[in-house]
Structure formats: structure tokens, C-alpha cells
């Protein structure tokens, strides 16, 4: 055990007494205040290489599958259901659009964004969609402050996003 700056004990990175299901000795891979990761020797590196081999398309698909679950949890725990339900509606409508489905979706301050990059810094040349407190939806252009339009439904908002996608193949 080692002590951190606040005097709390943490496991020391390196071998430990626990073993994997296969009987291999486990190793502390990294230690943070919240997480201790145990892995068999070489397992962490193999997992990282597998992610690199899978590529961008799999990362985008995994994100499209994970985001609705996350927003359902946010909606269920929120006091006001309007904005989380709006983001969830936008996600459901956007997932039906093949051109958007190739892009990496992410949210920031209740706004749904799309990027061809799967990690920061995200490329934001695509319009964004956001729910409004009154249940309507606003579509903004890629430039700050540019409002493309407001709609009554999430499907119409996503149709506006698709209509304003760049035509030069960057998406």
C-alpha cells in the first residue's frame, strides 16, 4: 500500500495476491482514487491492440448503441424530463439516418453533435440539434450562433441536419 497526498492508503502498482480465473497472477495495472484495475500480465496491452484493430467504424457503432442507454438513465434520474427526453428523441431519429450513422455522435450541454473523428478534438463541420424547454427542437449550423431552424419534432430537426450536411465528402 502507498499513501496518496491526502494520507489515504492505495494499492501499490505491481503484483498482488489475487489470481485470474485461469490461475494467472494478477497485476495492478494502474491506480487512481476511484479505480484499481487488475489484469493478468499482458492482458491490458492485448485489449488496447484489439481496440486499435477494430477501427473507427466499430467505435462509431458502439457509441450509437451506448448513447441511448446513457440518456435513458439521465431521463429516469432527472427532475425535469423534457430536455433528456428531447435528446433521446433526437438520438432515435438520427440513428435512422445512414449519413449521420457514419458519424460519431456526442452530446454537450443538451446538444447532439456529430463528428467524423472518434476522439477529441472533434471536427464539428456538421449542424447540431438541441431540444428546447418547450418541447421543440433547434438546429444550429457549424458556426457559432447560426440558427438553421426550429421544428416541432425530432425527426424534422434531424432532416434539417441531414439537409445541411457538407457535400464535399468530409462527413
Image (cartoon, helix red, strand yellow):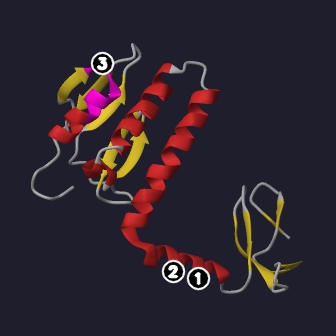
Q: Is residue 146 left or right of residue 94?
A: left
Q: Where on the picture, by quarter, is residue 136?
A: top left
Q: Position of residue 115 (x, y in %)?
A: 30, 52
Report the span colored magenta: 151-158
Q: Which residue is mark 3?
A: 152
The mark total stands at 3
Foreground tag (1 vs 3): 3
**Tags 2 and 1 in contact by the CB under 8 Å rule?**
yes
Residue at image location 27% in from the left, 54% down from the top: 123
In the picture, the quarter occupied by the C terminus is: bottom left
Label 2, on which residue? 49
First in sequence: mark 1 vs mark 3: 1
Name the image quarter holding the N terminus. Answer: bottom right
Q: Secondary structure at mark 1?
A: helix
Tag of residue 46: 1
Of circles 3 and 2, the one toward us is 3
Quarter holding residue 53: bottom left
Question: What predominant SS class does the magenta segment belong to?
Answer: helix
Quarter occupied by residue 2:
bottom right
Q: Position of residue 57 (x, y in %)?
A: 37, 65
Q: Which SS class for mark 3? A: loop
Q: Residues within 10 Å of mark 3 (few under 14, many from 20)?
A: some
Q: Which residue sits furthest top?
A: 134
Residue at x 49% of width, y 45% of height: 67
Q: Is residue 148 magenta?
A: no
Sequence order check, earlier mark of 3 and 2: 2
Whole-angstrom CA distance, mark 1 to mark 3, is 48 Å
Tell me how far mark 3 sits from mark 2, CA to CA.
45 Å
Q: Is residue 86 left or right of residue 126?
A: right
Amino acid at each position: 500500500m502507498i499513501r496518496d497526498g491526502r494520507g489515504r492508503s492505495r494499492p501499490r502498482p505491481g503484483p498482488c495476491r489475487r489470481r485470474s480465473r485461469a490461475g494467472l497472477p494478477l497485476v495492478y495495472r494502474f491506480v487512481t482514487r476511484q479505480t484499481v484495475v487488475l489484469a493478468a500480465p499482458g492482458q491490458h496491452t492485448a485489449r488496447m491492440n484489439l481496440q486499435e484493430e477494430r477501427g473507427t467504424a466499430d467505435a462509431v457503432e458502439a457509441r450509437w448503441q451506448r448513447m441511448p442507454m446513457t440518456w435513458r438513465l439521465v431521463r429516469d434520474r432527472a427532475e425535469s424530463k423534457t430536455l433528456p427526453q428531447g435528446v433521446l428523441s433526437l438520438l432515435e431519429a438520427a440513428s435512422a439516418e445512414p449519413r449521420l450513422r457514419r458519424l460519431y455522435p456526442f452530446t454537450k450541454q443538451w446538444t447532439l453533435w456529430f463528428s467524423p473523428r472518434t476522439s477529441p478534438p472533434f471536427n464539428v463541420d456538421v449542424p447540431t440539434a438541441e431540444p428546447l424547454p418547450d418541447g421543440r427542437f433547434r438546429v444550429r449550423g457549424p458556426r457559432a450562433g447560426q440558427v438553421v431552424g426550429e421544428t416541432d419534432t425530432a425527426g424534422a430537426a434531424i432532416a434539417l441536419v441531414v439537409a445541411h450536411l457538407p457535400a464535399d465528402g468530409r462527413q
